[in-house]
Amino acid sequence: MEKQTSFVLQGNIIYTPDKDHFVSLKDGYLVIENGRITAISAQKPADYSSLPLKECSGKLIMPGFADMHLHAPQYIQIGMGMDDQLLDWLDQYTFKEEPKFADPNFARKIYPLLVDELANCGTTSAAIFATIHKESTDILCDTLAQKGLRAYVGKVNMDTNSAPALTEDTEQSLADTEAFIQKWQKHDLVKPIVTPRFVPSTTAKMMTGLGKLAQEYHIPVQSHLSENPGEIQLVKELFPEDKYYMSVYERFGLFGQTPTLMAHCIHLSDEEIDIMAKRKVYAVHCPASNLNLASGLMPTRKLLNAGVNVALGTDIGGGHTLYMPHEIVRAIEISKIRSLYHPEETPLKLCEAFYLATKAGGAFFGQTGSLEAGCSADFLITDIPDFQQDRTVEEQLQYFIYHGTAQDIREVYVNGRSIKKQTI
Ligand code: GUN
Ligand code: FE
């Protein structure tokens, strides 16, 4: 990891301070001091002449991406079982693959590959599900910390309706989760997040214990919500006394009592959407996964209009790519398809989808995901081909998002430290 975290960076700068605007500077300057952005200016900042200058003329500088929902163990099953829908796919693939992570040596082999690919794809922050296994989950955290990525990591909890190899003893699972929280809660980059897999795989006793842990230690929560009609029906059968799927999480202290991420949130009534907005629960839209598992078309515009915080996630292995620009494009495409059938739901603009993939998710970690003064210096430096040099910076970003690849991402920084460097 590079030590130097104070410097001045020059290049074509672009970010979204809010969801409706890009701010861009051609040949602008970012001042980075102790891993934070302290100034941004169009001219070379005279006050900082003592800091080294990193010149990146003709390159694009943008915030790193926040992948707010992915399953680390499912790196090994990407692309498999995509002819099935959620519940069959979980039974046929996921619940057969995840037990492999009971072996720490297997985790040691796989997790570095995932973490390297995340950094290479320009993901600087991530909210990650591990597995039920405490040792492997620690290995994932160690790997992320060593790489220098910013992450929330969850030891997954499951004590019912699962394959025998993934069914935990409730007390042991809660004890393991508490030990995991205690181990990682003070780390500056890699932090614990309470992670019941989803309502069908956790008993009331488990959820009661997890809600207590989240509140006692002030730890955020992540899970899945209203992804698939069969899943929603199953939750109704398991918890008939609760009005909505989300009411189950809410009752157990797992829905906005501490900051909460809920993946998918596709099939919601207007009242449920309002509850999410009131409780400030994030909906994490996972476009590729929703298409692969034929889960549905996320009504992103409707959620945004209702004031729900929306972020983006890859959801590998439901999703098949770790490269967030593909998810940005897919989120826009899905919103365009929805607008054909629901004209009041206007399609997402690129600045909105880019915002969801950077500042919206980044906000879950504090001041990250933007290039404003005060934000952590989490950013990417990407190539722009010669034939695009005379475009506006916004056009250069459009080209990169739609046509760029991970190879075009030359450098990746978290807290002003380089975590990927390609030599040309
Ligand atoms: N719901 C419960 N577990 C999972 C999972 O692993 N992936 C997805 N997409 N949905 C889930
Ligand atoms: Fe998921």
Image (cartoon, helix red, strand yellow):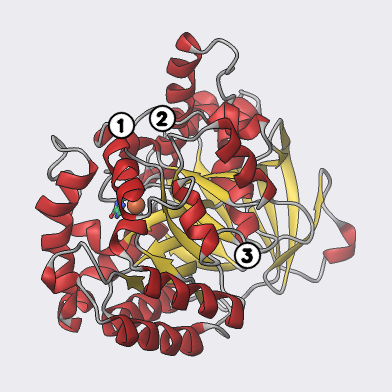
Circle 2 Cα neighbour tier, 10 Å, few/some/many (<14 / 14–19 / ≥20) = some
- In front: label 2 or label 3: 3
Give the CA separation, mark 2 to mark 3: 31 Å
Question: Residue 200 is drawn in which quadrant?
Answer: bottom left
Give the SS element for disc 3: loop
Above or below 67: residue 258: below
Give residue 116's mark: none
Give the SS element for disc 2: helix
Residue at image coords 24%, 67%? 160
Q: How many marks?
A: 3
- In front: label 2 or label 1: 1
Give residue 291's mark: 1
Give the CA separation, mark 2 to mark 1: 9 Å
Circle 3 Cα neighbour tier, 10 Å, few/some/many (<14 / 14–19 / ≥20) = some
Residue at image coords 24%, 64%? 73
Q: What residue is disc 2 on?
A: 330
Q: What residue is disc 3 on?
A: 257
| First along the sequence among labels 1 and 3 | 3
Residue at image coords 53%, 31%? 300
Q: Is mark 2 within 8 Å of ligand 1?
A: no
Question: Residue 275 is drawn in which quadrant?
Answer: top right
Q: Nearer the viewer, residue 307 or 188?
A: 307
